[in-house]
Amino acid sequence: MDDTKEEKKESTSDNSGERDKPEVYKSIDNANLAAKRMEDIHKKFKEENDRFESLYARQVLGGQTDAGNQPEKKEEISEEDYVNKVMSGKFKKENGKE
């Protein structure tokens, strides 16, 4: 049973050609593969960046910027009104708590 496992392992390494290459070439292949991946990522990043820049330019030219936008202000209530709301039970219903 152990002999068949060893034969299978040997046959896969013979077919892949890994035994023929010295360690130096394997590391060079790995470096080339890593460089290829980095180039692909760089291309994708550049495309996304260009797309974002054109979108931002359209927003600026179209007048859709963040300038002038103010966050909503919460309505301030006096202490007396707060006490009345809490005592009547309206405050809990407005805030989603019961």
Image: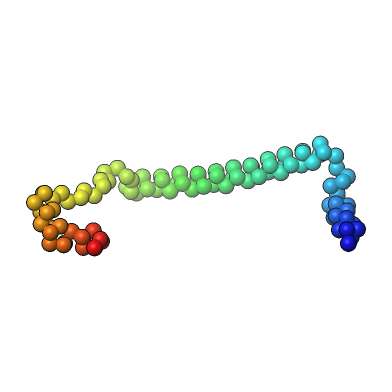
Relative placement, left or right, of 58 versus 21 is left
Taking 39 as reference, is 5 left or right?
Answer: right
Image quadrant assignment for residue 86: bottom left
- 51 or 90, which lies in front? 90
Q: Decide if residue 4 is on the left or right side of residue 55.
A: right
As drawn, the residue found furthest toward the left would be: 80
- Residue at the image point whose x is 50% and y is 44% from the top: 49
Residue 50 rendering spot, x and y as whole percentages: 50, 45
Residue drawn at x 84%, y 47% as measured from the top left: 18
Could you say which is closer to the camera, residue 6 or residue 61? 6
Residue 11 appears in the picture as rendered: no
Give the total number of marks visible in the rendering: 0
Quadrant (top left/top right/bottom left/bottom right) for the N terminus = bottom right
Q: Quadrant of residue 46?
A: top right
Q: Residue at x 79, y 41 (%)?
A: 26
Q: Residue at x 18, y 59 (%)?
A: 91
